[in-house]
Amino acid sequence: MARSHTAPKELSPAALLELYNWTCAMCFGKAVTIHEIEPKSKRSADWWEFDNRVPLCGYCHDLVHLEGTARWHDRLHKARVVLVSLYGIEVTVTLPHT
C-alpha cells in the first residue's frame, strides 16, 4: 500500500520521520533525525526539498558526519530512493497561491 502525503513546500522533520515510518535509510533501525544529503550551505535555495532529506538513526547520522557528508552523498541518495520504493511514498507538494 502506498503512503501518500500532500505537504506544504517544506515538510517538517517530524512529518518526514512519520512518513518514513521512523526507519533509518542506511540500517533500517529507528530513525531519530532527518539529514540533508546536500547541506544547506551548498544548496541554500532548496535544501528542504523532499529528495534532499533522508531519515537516519543516531549511529548512522554520527557516522556520516564523522566521515564527511560529501563522501556519503551517493550512498545517502540511493538509500533514500530504496526507502521511498519500499514504503511506496508519494509526496505532492502544494505551493501557496501568489
Image (cartoon, rainbow, N blue to C red):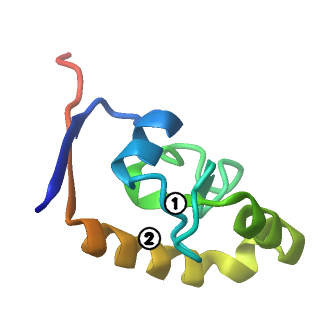
Looking at the figure, which quarter contains the N terminus? bottom left
- Asked if marks 2 and 1 touch (Cβ < 8 Å), the reply is yes
Decide: is 30 above or below 41. Answer: below
Q: Is residue 59 left or right of residue 25?
A: right
Work out which quarter of the rendered image holds the C terminus and state it: top left
Above-or-below relation of 8 to 72: above
**Upstream in sequence: badge 2 or badge 1:** 1
Outermost residue, front side:
29
Taking the view exactly as shown, the residue that stands out farthest to the left is 1
- Residue labelled with disc 2: 80
Percent coordinates x, y for residue 5 in the rendering:
21, 42
Residue 7 in the image, given as x and y percentages of width and height: 26, 34
Locate residue 11: give its quadrant: top left
Q: At 26% from the left edge and 66% from the top edge, which residue is drawn?
A: 87
Q: Is residue 34 left or right of residue 60?
A: left
37 versus 12 height, above or below: below
Residue 39 is situated, as x and y percent measured from the top left of the image, at: 67, 55
Q: Residue at x 23, y 29 (%)?
A: 95
Disc 1 residue type?
A: Val
Residue 58 placement: quadrant: bottom right
Q: Which mark is residue 70?
A: none
Who is closer to the viewer here, 40 or 67?
67
For residue 54, which numbered disc appears in the image? 1
Count neighbours of disc 2 (C-alpha within 10 A) and say few if under 14, some if 14 to 19, many if 20 or more: many
Residue 43, placed above or below residue 10: below
Q: Residue 61, how many percent across, how many down?
A: 73, 62
Q: Residues within 10 Å of mark 1 (few under 14, many from 20)?
A: many
As helix, strand or loop, the secondary structure at mark 2 comes to helix
Secondary element at tag 1 = strand
Q: Is residue 84 left or right of residue 3?
A: right
